[in-house]
Image (spheres, rainbow, N blue to C red):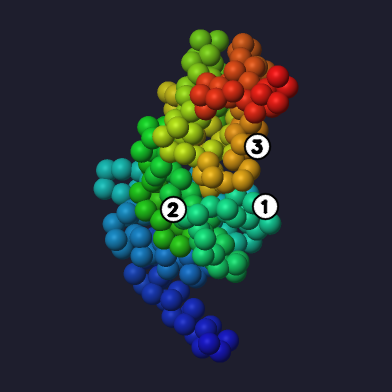
Amino acid sequence: MGKDVWKAEERADKGILKEKGSELFKTVEGVLDTSTLMTLYELENRGYFRKLMGVVSTGKEANVYWGVGDGEEVAVKVYRTATLDFKKIWVYIAGDPRFSRIKKSTRGMMFIWAEKEFKNLKLAYEAEVRVPKPIVQRKNVLVMEFIGEDGVPAPKIKDVELTAQELREAFEKVIDYVAKLYRKAELIHSDISEYNILWWDEPVLIDLSQAVMLSHPLSHEFLVRDLKNISVYFSREGVSVPSIEELYYQVTGEEAPWKQEST
């Protein structure tokens, strides 16, 4: 496709958005590319939300918008090509049998990253792990349950003052989530920390793009890293936590490999 033709089509697409989705367009114009805008318009047109009300979270890889529909709130996560670290995310994609055919283009990788989070959320949700309920994914856009109320997102656990009892229960709940991910969903979150746990009357795990299947060659390493991150955070908050070896056994039902080697 020639550059002039592509520019003409892009202008035409923007015209469609301005004419048919003016409220949506006003919210995100100048921030997102035309292809993403068209994807958002398609999702709006299919009834997944009526309006985007603004950004509620800006991360390294994506913006999350608050969307409203008929009596419900949704989170609309838009992955950005400009800020994705493709060398970093490749580690989590390579070796995943669900994504054996990968288009190694910038845009193709971004679509895979969004699809990966959608599929991981679905597996986690079905395993009864408290995560945002996934609704739909198209290209680089993921629509899911909004954790919060009236456009105000739930805070990260690190930003909430919890009692000693609440912290203890939160720790036990998070370890239970890790165990359910491992045993039921056959997933390792791979990036659990106090920055990826929301608090909404209970812990809620978020950011599952990087979660890997147990068959991933680095799944064991990622699991141990998750357990260490959880242990360090809750220990710092005054919770008495078991050893990593004990947590590993609690999650997997198996003795830690490094413990076996030392005996």
Q: Please name the residue that numbered disc 3 is placed on.
A: 221
Depth check, mark 2 against mark 1: the one in front is: 1
Q: Is residue 78 above or below residue 235?
A: below
User: Residue furthest toward the front?
Assistant: 263
Which of the 4 image quadrants contains residue 79? bottom right
Q: Earlier in the sequence, mark 2 or mark 1?
A: 1
Q: Amino acid at mark 1?
A: Lys
The CA span between labels 3 and 1 is: 16 Å
Q: In this view of the protein, can residue 111 be seen by the observer?
A: yes
Q: Is residue 257 above or below residue 108?
A: above
Closer to the camera in the image, 136 or 36? 136
Q: x and y percent of residue 39 in the render? A: 42, 65
Q: x and y percent of residue 201 in the render? A: 42, 23
Q: Residues within 10 Å of mark 1 (few under 14, many from 20)?
A: few
Q: Please name the residue that numbered disc 1 is placed on.
A: 88
Q: Residues within 10 Å of mark 3 (few under 14, many from 20)?
A: few
For numbered disc 2, what is the local secondary structure?
Answer: strand
Which of the 4 image quadrants contains residue 47? bottom left
The CA span between labels 2 and 1 is: 21 Å
Q: x and y percent of residue 263 in the render? A: 70, 19
Q: Earlier in the sequence, mark 3 or mark 1?
A: 1
Q: In this view of the protein, can residue 153 be seen by the observer?
A: no
Q: Please name the residue that numbered disc 2 is placed on.
A: 142
The CA span between labels 2 and 3 is: 28 Å
